[in-house]
């Protein structure tokens, strides 16, 4: 067999799996193949917010993410109706914002420098686990491997091949990129200082929750080819999908309007995010799922750090199974659940099911404005800083 490991998808989860495998078992480098249907730098709809946990995992891999164009948000605001809690990280930025075409291209370059092959423009159509191998059917032909890793994102083919009937929990998301300031004619009619104050900060606004949108609106600083821009979007876990909800664009249009941006002047793009649930199965013999294919953070849909974390866990599991010549992967789900990554995912799943179905305004006012120290302690202990413990 030409390959020990075929990784389907060259996003953060697939690339992280390869980088971690190379660290643990360098002799495998030439036996790993990544199949990516697009060509780098490829577009990926994403706001590009990199949390501290993503940075910790990259640092531990010996990578310097400063090489990727970025902007920093000095603090993150969690607001309900424009007022709330602001979080800073002592002596560093609260959020680094990258563009995914640039970030993924950079990470793929690091993988290649280590001698791992990435085949671009190869679309996987089918993944068929057999007792002694996995058959990976692509549009370009058939490949065989000891182990396949499904790192092909929320709509990936691997999950559909191995768990065709399992339930799928997905969030809906819309994203809009605008210049950093509103058009000049609108700025004249507004408090300019309010706009300037918002620059360089990341905002999460939870005001859509009482209207059955179980999520938030975001407004992040970003850059495109060095030009300061803003990335806006709306995220809905779909936990309240059965209830009456406004048109999905409306709360975003309203929020942007408050800051003198007109949503209809900008291109809107959407993409689902597959969410973590304790029900999600993560493996069958010889095949593992990672990243969005496995399921990501239900509270925020934050998935880059989570994808990098899944890669670290999958690499450990694969290297052990290659050593032992035993590929059942029966314990992968419990290994994930017991890890720091699993614990944060379970906590976030619980938090999402507590805070999003509660529609009372007073509850959200209390949560984001009234009990700041408690929310901050819970976030720092159970939600963030898991990367160090991975
Ligand atoms: C609008 C939006 C905003 C977001 N904002 C943030 C944010 O600010 N911060 C954050 O942390 N997360 C964010 N996320 C989530 C984040 O983008 C994902 O969680 C993350 O990309 C998951 O990484 P992944 O490697 O699992 O999957 P992906 O990044 O989706 O990578 C999958 C790869 O597989 C390839 N592929 C797919 N199918 C095949 C196939 N059949 N054959 C070969 N290759 C295939 C794809 O081309 C792609 O390169 C956002 C998501 C959305 C939709």
Image (tube, rainbow, N blue to C red):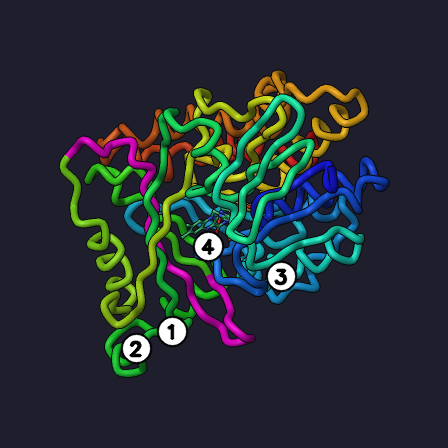
Residue at numbered disc 1: 181
Instruction: Determine whether label 4 and label 1 are within 8 Å by CB.
Output: no
Callout 4: helix, strand or loop? Answer: loop
Give the alpha-carbon distance from disc 2 to disc 4, as whole Å: 28 Å
Give the alpha-carbon distance from disc 2 to disc 1, as whole Å: 8 Å
Magenta stretch bounds: 221-243
Residue at numbered disc 3: 105
Image quarter hosting the N terminus = top right
Crowd around label 1: few <14 · some 14–19 · many ≥20 (10 Å) = some
Residue at numbered disc 4: 46
- Give residue 73's mark: none
Instruction: Determine whether label 2 and label 1 are within 8 Å by CB.
Output: yes
**Left or right side of 25 for 327:** left
Can residue 290 be seen in the rendering of this structure? yes
Image quarter hosting the C terminus = top right
Question: Closer to the camera: disc 4 or disc 1?
Answer: 4
Most foreground residue, 138 or 168:
138
Residue at numbered disc 2: 187
**Residue 237, position in %: x, y?**
34, 37
Question: Closer to the camera: disc 2 or disc 3?
Answer: 3
């Amino acid at each position: 067999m030409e390959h020990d490991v075929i990784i389907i998808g060259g996003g953060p989860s697939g690339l992280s799996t390869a980088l971690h495998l190379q660290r643990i078992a360098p002799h495998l480098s030439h036996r790993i193949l990544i199949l990516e249907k697009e060509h780098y730098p490829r577009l990926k709809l994403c706001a590009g917010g990199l949390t501290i946990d993503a940075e910790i995992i990259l640092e531990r891999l010996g990578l310097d993410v400063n090489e990727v164009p970025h902007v920093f948000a000095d603090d993150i605001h969690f607001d309900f109706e424009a007022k709330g809690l602001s979080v800073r990280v002592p002596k560093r930025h609260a959020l680094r914002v990258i563009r995914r075409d640039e970030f993924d291209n950079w990470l793929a370059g690091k993988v290649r420098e280590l001698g791992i092959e990435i085949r671009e423009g190869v679309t996987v159509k089918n993944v068929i686990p057999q007792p002694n191998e996995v058959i990976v059917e692509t549009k370009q032909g058939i490949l065989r491997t000891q182990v396949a890793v499904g790192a092909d994102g929320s709509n990936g083919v691997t999950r559909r091949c191995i768990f065709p009937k399992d339930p799928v929990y997905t969030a809906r998301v819309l994203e809009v990129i605008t210049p950093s300031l509103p058009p000049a004619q609108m700025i004249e009619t507004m408090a300019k200082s309010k706009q300037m104050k918002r620059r360089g900060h990341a905002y999460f606004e939870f005001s859509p929750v009482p209207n059955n949108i179980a999520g938030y609106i975001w407004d992040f600083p970003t850059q495109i080819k060095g030009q300061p821009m803003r990335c806006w979007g709306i995220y809905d876990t779909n936990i309240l999908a059965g209830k009456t909800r406004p048109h999905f664009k409306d709360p975003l249009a309203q929020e942007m309007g408050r800051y003198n941006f007109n949503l209809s002047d900008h291109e809107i793009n959407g993409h689902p995010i597959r969410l973590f649930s304790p029900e999600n199965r993560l493996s069958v013999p010889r095949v593992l799922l990672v990243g969005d294919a496995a399921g990501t953070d239900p509270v925020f849909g934050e998935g880059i750090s989570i994808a990098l974390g899944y890669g670290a866990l999958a690499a450990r599991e694969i290297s052990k199974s290659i050593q032992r010549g035993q590929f059942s992967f029966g314990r992968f789900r419990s290994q994930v659940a017991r890890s720091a990554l699993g614990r944060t995912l379970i906590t976030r799943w619980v938090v999402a099911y507590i805070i999003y179905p509660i529609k009372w305004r007073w509850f959200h006012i209390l949560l984001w404005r009234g009990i700041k120290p408690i929310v901050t302690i819970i976030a720092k202990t159970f939600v963030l800083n898991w990367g160090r413990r991975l």
